[in-house]
Image (cartoon, rainbow, N blue to C red):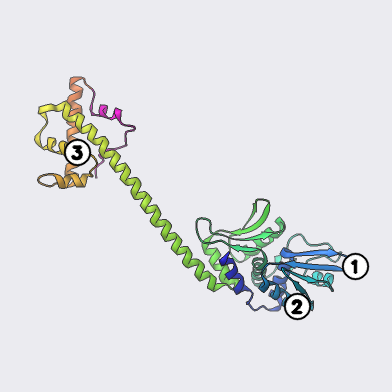
Amino acid sequence: MTLTNDVCAELVTVPLDRTSAASELATIIRLAGSFEHGSQLTLTIACSDPRVLKRVSVLLHEELLLNGRIDGDTLVVSDNVAPALRKLGLITRGGTPVRGLPMFIVNGSMLEAEAAWRGAFLVAGTLMEPGRSSSLDIQCPCQEVALALVGCGRRLNFTVKSKDVRGSERAVIKDEHDIGALLTRLGASRTRIVWEEELKRRQKTTANSRLANFDDANMRRSVQAAIAASAKVSRALEILGDDVPDHLAEAGHLRTTYQQASLEELGKLADPQMTKDAIAGRIRRLLTTADRRAKELGIPPTSEALKHLDEEPDGFYPRQ
């Protein structure tokens, strides 16, 4: 949660104009607020970050002339709550709470959309560490709120999706470019730099790991092919006996003697040295000659030697 805390530390210092303040405040109340009906309506805003509660307290006083009391992880407002909520568009004139976000946010400007996302992140946001599942998400009280944030995000040209995660509705951004751009728009540019540096480091580590795994797999396939080819060459030498040409016999004996060596290594072991193409060509001709002789004699070909192997690799000696 370190990055999430870093984002919040920056966002609580972002200055707001009157419109943005109303949008941020309304979103915070919608996501983190609850109401109690008694002799008068009481608003309780829950948040574990004291910096956020302090910011909300200041906004309530400056924008709505409401005085709240911070008690641990909650901010409680008891006086003139209903008129303030109507002013923010959170309840209708008849006193019914809105399901999503207020219409002035849903149909508002890009600045209001930014402020809504800022408020949502402050009380319900999470920035995941860069890795296989990089994401920035907002935990929402219902699907309507998640869809409203999706609309605000799209107005800012970000790809946002509404998602049910174990019964919890969330507005989620997965695209790494969008996450970085949103952090800057909300006012967390320093955290964006840290996040992107960590992302690059993780991507480099992942790429190196994949390359190593790729190289290991290639090596295993190469060794399997060399062993299988050695078995076929042994069968070829057996079929041809003394009739095998000297230059093909030399290549064949190198293959059977150094079963796990690469073609390039076999070429260097030859006397005189040969290129890997030359050694591969001689081994191909040896196998072809032996298979032709086997057909004439009516005996099993060189591939008969592979039956004792667990599997036959494809293409033992492709042209390289």
Q: Main secondary structure of the magenta part?
A: loop
- Position in image of residue 282 (x %, y %): 16, 38
- Position in image of residue 40 (x %, y %): 88, 68
Which amino acid is tagged 1? Ser
Q: Taking 66 as reference, is 128 above or below it?
A: above
Residue depicted at x 72% and y 70%: 72
Q: Quadrant of residue 91?
A: bottom right
Residue on which the image places disc 2: 63
Residue span colored magenta: 300-320
- Position in image of residue 158 (x %, y %): 58, 63
Which amino acid is tagged 2? Glu
Residue on which the image places disc 1: 39
Dot 2, crowdedness within 10 Å: few (<14), some or many (≥20)? Answer: some
Residue at the far top: name it. Answer: 298
Q: Taking 301 as reference, is 145 above or below it?
A: below
Quarter of the figure that contains the C terminus: top left
Residue on which the image places disc 3: 255
Q: Taking 10 as reference, is 278 above or below it?
A: above
Residue at the far right: name it. Answer: 39
Q: Quadrant of residue 224?
A: top left
Question: Seen in the image, is 43 located left or right of residue 164?
Answer: right
